[in-house]
């Protein structure tokens, strides 16, 4: 089963409007604060065969001017397996889920690379391969987790928020619903929910702000790393 992502979670919302140009978003992002986040994803789907499938995972995200780093947070028993695999001398496979992804602006163009600190490699991804690493090419979806312009297209809700400076937005379309708790000061969604009233599917993203900012940013420490390309890992 393919694990869902933030892009899948937000597809229905993203289809309601166009994505802003990176140059415009870079200027807007200058006012957005630096953040370190933990993002939890959950999905539940009822199949036509009557099977209920649930999936959940967590990611760590660091946001800085013109840079975003996203890394999967592995449970201890899974991380032990990953560490054992990493001890091998051969590096034949590229797992875009387990290697931290670095999304950045380069001359107003959105780029993505993967920084493998274990094997000391930086793997560049050409735009033609974005789909294979589950990246939509949107700077807004990476930096804000959801394009602020699309957030504004969803009506404000009368639902109250316990978070100062955060407001709920909600929309219903036929039998489907979308809910967003958007933090105006942090410029980030704290909760995103989508689903249908019949209960055949439900998706939720919840963001937890970290109290301190990390200083060991991987893209600042790649001196001596091998420069790889996505094609280097294809059979």
Image (tube, rainbow, N blue to C red):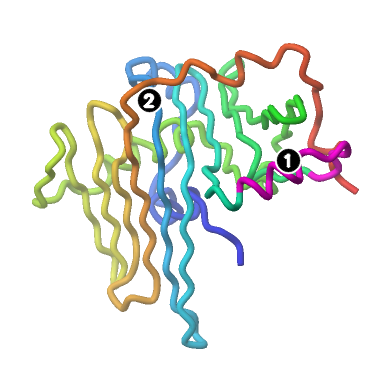
Helix, strand or loop under label 2: strand
Give the vertical position of 188 relative to 6 (above or below).
above
Query: What residue is shown at x 49% (from left), y 85% (from top)?
Result: 48
| Furthest residue in direction bottom, as rendered | 49
Q: Is residue 228 above or below residue 147?
A: above
Frontmost residue, 99 versus 12: 99
Q: Residue at x 80, y 31 (%)?
A: 229
User: Residue 201 — which label?
Assistant: none
Q: Please provide percent x and percent y for residue 63.
A: 44, 25
**213 shown above or below 45:** above
Count the numbered circles shown. Answer: 2
Instruction: Compare residues 182 and 154 and report the one nearer the observer.
Output: 182
Q: Position of residue 206 (x, y in %)?
A: 34, 47
Q: Dot 1 lies on which element?
A: helix
Along the viewing direction, whichever of 136 and 234 lies nearer the viewer: 234
Q: Is residue 14 left or right of residue 198?
A: right
Task: Return the residue at label 1.
Answer: 128
Whether the magenta-drawn stretch holds residue 180 is answered as no
Confirm whether the magenta stretch covers residue 88: yes
| The magenta segment | 79-93
Label 1, residues with CA under 10 Å away: few <14, some 14-19, many ≥20: few
Residue 173 lies in what quarter of the image? bottom left
Left or right: residue 119 compared with residue 147:
right
Q: Which residue is drawn at the image coordinates 31% and 78% (left, top)?
A: 198
Q: Which residue is mark 2?
A: 35
Report the Cα–Cα distance between label 2 and label 1.
Answer: 30 Å
Res. 133 image quadrant: top right
List the single residue furthest toward the right.
235
- The residue at 41%/43% (across/down) is 39
Can you give x and y, in whole percent of width and height, for residue 227 in the image? 80, 22
Residue 54 spot, x, y in % from top left = 46, 68
Question: Quadrant of the image for the N terminus?
Answer: bottom right
């Amino acid at each position: 089963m393919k694990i869902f992502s933030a892009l899948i979670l937000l597809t229905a919302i993203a289809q309601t409007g166009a994505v802003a140009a990176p140059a415009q978003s870079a200027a807007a992002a200058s006012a957005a604060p630096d953040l370190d986040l933990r993002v939890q994803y959950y999905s539940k789907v009822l199949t036509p065969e009557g099977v209920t499938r649930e999936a959940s995972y967590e990611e760590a995200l660091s946001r800085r001017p013109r840079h975003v780093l996203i890394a999967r947070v592995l449970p201890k028993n899974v991380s032990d397996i990953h560490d054992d695999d990493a001890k091998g001398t051969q590096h034949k496979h590229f797992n875009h889920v387990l290697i931290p992804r670095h999304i950045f602006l380069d001359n107003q163009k959105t780029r993505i690379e993967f920084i493998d600190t274990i094997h000391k490699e930086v793997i560049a991804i050409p735009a033609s391969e974005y789909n294979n690493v589950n990246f939509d090419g949107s700077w807004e979806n990476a930096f804000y987790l959801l394009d602020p312009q699309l957030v504004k297209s969803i009506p404000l809700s009368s639902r109250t928020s316990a978070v100062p400076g955060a407001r709920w937005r909600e929309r219903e379309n036929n039998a489907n619903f979308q809910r967003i708790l958007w933090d105006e000061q942090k410029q980030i969604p704290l909760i995103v929910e989508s689903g249908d009233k019949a209960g055949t599917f439900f998706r939720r993203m919840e963001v937890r702000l970290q109290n301190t900012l990390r200083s060991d940013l991987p893209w600042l420490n790649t001196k001596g790393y091998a420069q790889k390309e996505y094609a280097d890992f294809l059979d």
